[in-house]
Image (cartoon, rainbow, N blue to C red):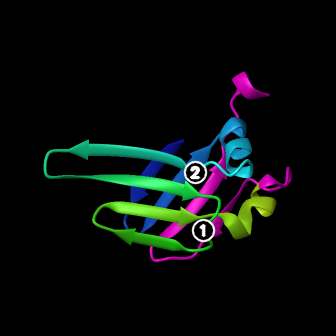
């Protein structure tokens, strides 16, 4: 999972194996801890909304998993704040 933060927006790119993990009910998490703080982002296949506090953002993708899996869709946008774009990033190693 690749994450990019910009002002008021988060962009998340996942590959096909990560999408399959979400469908299997597995949450995906990336984190950067440091002394006294840090941040993390979790894509949660059970949660239906976004929750954030103290450097942790939990993005519920339950309601958009089918749309995200549509082969004709590049991704989905979850309204914010922050707005979260979840996009498919299928590299040649997974095609």
Q: How many marks?
A: 2
Q: Residue at x 68, y 30 (%)?
A: 91
Q: Residue furthest top?
A: 93
Within the magenta stretch, is there residue 13?
no
**Local crowd at mark 2 within 10 Å, few (<14), some, or many (≥20)?**
some
Q: Tell me: 7 left or right of 47.
A: left
Quadrant assignment for the N terminus = top right
Q: Is residue 70 above or below residue 89?
A: below
Which of the two labelled residues, at mark 1 and mark 2, occupies the earlier sequence position? Answer: 2
1 and 2 marks in contact (CB < 8 Å):
no
Residue 27 left/right relative to 36: right
Image quadrant of residue 68?
A: bottom right
Residue 45 position within the rendered picture, expressed as x and y whole percent measured from the top left: 65, 59
Rendered location of residue 20, percent (x, y): 74, 43
Seen as rendered, the residue at the extreme left is 36
Which residue is tagged 2? 27
The numbered mark at residue 47 is 1
- Spatial separation of the CA atoms under disc 1 and disc 2: 10 Å
x then y, percent, for residue 16: 72, 38
Magenta stretch in the rendered image: 69-95
- Under tag 2, what secondary structure? loop
Query: Is residue 46 shown left or right of residue 33?
Result: right
The residue lying at 62 percent from left, 44 percent from top is 14
Q: Position of residue 21 (x, y in %)?
A: 68, 43
């Amino acid at each position: 999972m690749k994450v990019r933060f910009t002002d008021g927006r988060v962009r998340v790119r996942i590959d096909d194996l990560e999408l399959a993990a979400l469908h299997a009910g597995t949450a995906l998490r990336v984190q950067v801890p440091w002394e006294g703080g840090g941040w993390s982002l979790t894509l949660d296949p059970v949660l239906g909304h976004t929750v954030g506090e103290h450097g942790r953002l939990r993005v519920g993708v339950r309601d958009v998993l089918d749309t995200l899996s549509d082969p004709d869709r590049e991704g989905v946008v979850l309204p914010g704040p922050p707005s979260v774009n979840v996009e498919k990033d299928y590299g040649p190693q997974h095609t």
